[in-house]
Image: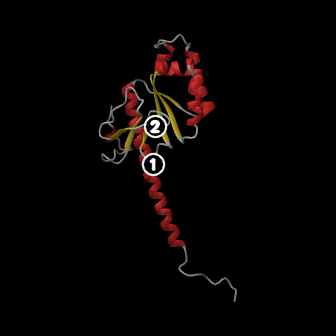
Amino acid sequence: MRLVNEDPIIECPKKGAFTIIVDTREQYPYTFAGQNVIVKKLDEGDYSLEGFEKRIVWERKSLDDFIGTVVHNFDTFEKELQRAQAIEDFNILIESNIIDIYARKYYSQAHPHSILGRICSIRQDYHIPCFLLGNRQLAQNFLTRYFLRFIKREKEKEREEKRNARTIAIDLPLWPTNTGGC
C-alpha cells in the first residue's frame, strides 16, 4: 500500500497546512501522523477540518455501532441525519465491508438486507453517503486522503478566484467610454 505523500495526484501538504478536528465525544479517535490534530466539540459528526466545520464532516462507525444506531436507535439518529443535511459534505464512514455484513460478522440479529436497506435509505432519503471502508486502518487512510483532496480542491478554487479577479480587473476600461451622448 502506498503512503499518502507518495501519491502523485494528492500531494501531502506541509505539516501545519491544515488542522483536523476530532470531536470530544469520539471514543476511539484516529491518529493522523504528520498532521495537526485538535480535540474540540463538533456540532455534528466525529471529524472535520478547522475552518470548514460547517462544510465537511465525517461520522465514524464500527459495524456494530452502525447497526445499533440505524437498526435499533434510528429515531435518534434520524434527527442527526436531518441536521447533517445542512452540511455540504457530510459522510458516514463504516469500518467494515459488505462481505462482513452478508457474513453476519456483527452481534445484532438484524438481517443483512435490513442493514443494506438502511444504508441505501440514508443515501437516497438524506443524500448522505455511507462508505464501507473495510477496517479501521483502511478507513483512517481513506479519511486522510479525503481531507487532503478537500484541501487541495479548496486551494485550487482560491487560485481560480484570484485568477478570475485579475482577469476582471484587466478587462475593465481605465476610463469611461463615449456612448454617443453629448
Q: Residue at x 53, y 10 (%)?
A: 109
In the picture of the structure, the residue carrying the numbered disc 2 is 42
- Report the residue that reaches farthest toward the bottom: 182
In the picture of the structure, the residue carrying the numbered disc 1 is 153
> Could you give the CA–CA distance between mark 2 and mark 1, rounded to whole angstroms?
23 Å
- Identify the amino acid type marked 1: Arg
- Element assignment for label 2: loop
Front tag of 2 and 1 = 2
Q: Residue at x 52, y 37 (%)?
A: 90
Please tell me which of labels 2 and 1 falls first in the chain: 2
Provide residue 130's location: percent of width, then percent of height. Answer: 52, 29
Q: Is residue 113 above or below residue 11?
A: above
Decide: few, some or many residues near mark 2? Use Cα within 10 Å; few <14, some 14-19, many ≥20.
Answer: some
Q: Residue at x 64, y 84 (%)?
A: 178
Q: Is residue 29 above or below residue 89?
A: above
- Identify the amino acid type marked 2: Leu
Provide residue 6's location: percent of width, then percent of height. Answer: 31, 40
Q: Is residue 6 above or below residue 133?
A: below
Provide residue 112's location: percent of width, then percent of height. Answer: 55, 15
- Element assignment for label 1: helix
Q: Residue at x 48, y 41 (%)?
A: 56
Q: Is residue 92 left or right of residue 36?
A: right
Q: Is residue 177 left or right of residue 96?
A: right
Provide residue 118's location: percent of width, then percent of height. Answer: 58, 23
